[in-house]
Amino acid sequence: DTEVTQTPKHLVMGMTNKKSLKCEQHMGHRAMYWYKQKAKKPPELMFVYSYEKLSINESVPSRFSPECPNSSLLNLHLHALQPEDSALYLCASSQVQASPQHFGDGTRLSIL
Amino acid sequence: DAKTTQPTSMDCAEGRAANLPCNHSTISGNEYVYWYRQIHSQGPQYIIHGLKNNETNEMASLIITEDRKSSTLILPHATLRDTAVYYCIVNAGNNRKLIWGLGTSLAVNP
């Protein structure tokens, strides 16, 4: 069982849709992360939040918009995605930014 | 940023020790070595990390060479549930980003 919960587990959307991915942790962690993972590749860091402030944006296209409403929640808003954005999106959290990360099981996103 | 090199795949018999090597010859003095694994259809799982000294926890042991240019993750008694992709990672820079390598796909066979 994972302590980082991601919803939904699967999402299929068209290129004109707007959707959001959600991530929740109740371990009191103050750093949260979004990663993108393509098949048979390692995870690629997208965003890092530290104490609810955006700490790192790895030059991610603006069609991906992160949000950290509070210390337990992390959202990823999606708009006008491309087929190449189909991937597994992983959320992680850690006590602080330099600590070991705990991952959710991801949202598998398919863009039609 | 330091990079890591790992074998693409390895096999291990159930009950035997699995020794997974990693090369990180460009590692800097303040960069830690982390190991994570990813079982199929799951998110990555933290295993262990270290800076200079060898480390052990309930999952594994981490042996780091004195020059810190390589390390070995040891699973002392591998089980079928240890079949996974194992990533050797160094963190980088003040932001402590994890720089992921391509990983080793470990197959534990009965």
Image (tube, coloured by chain):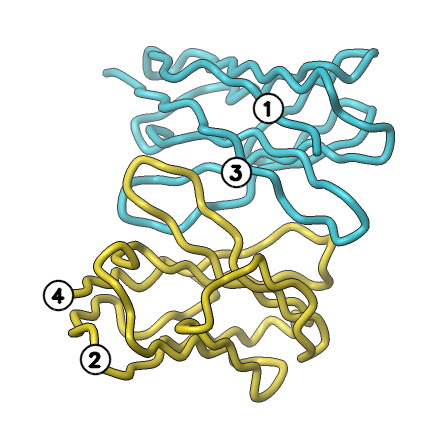
Dot 2 or dot 4: first in sequence order is 2
- Chain on which label 2 sits: A
**Nearest the camera: A32 or B64?**
A32
Q: Let me know if residue A1 appears in the view.
A: no
The nearer-to-camera label among 1 and 4 is 4
Which mark identifies residue B4? 1
Q: How many marks?
A: 4
- Kindly identify the residue that appears in the image at 67 percent across and 79 percent down: A52
Q: CA distance from mark 3 to mark 4?
A: 32 Å
Amino acid beneath label 1:
Thr
Residue wearing tag 4: A112
Instruction: List the residue tagged with mark 3.
Output: B36
Kindly identify the amino acid type of the residue bearing the numbered disc 2: Thr
The residue sitting at 21% across, 80% down in the picture is A16
Q: Are marks 3 and 1 on the same chain?
A: yes
Residue A2 % position (x, y): 42, 60
Query: Disc 3 to disc 2, how far (Cα)?
Result: 36 Å
Residue drawn 20% across the image and 73% down it:
A15
Q: In this rendering, do the residues under marks 1 and 4 share a single chain?
A: no
User: Is disc 3 in contact with disc 2, using a CB cutoff of under 8 Å?
Assistant: no
B75 w.r.t. A81: above or below = above
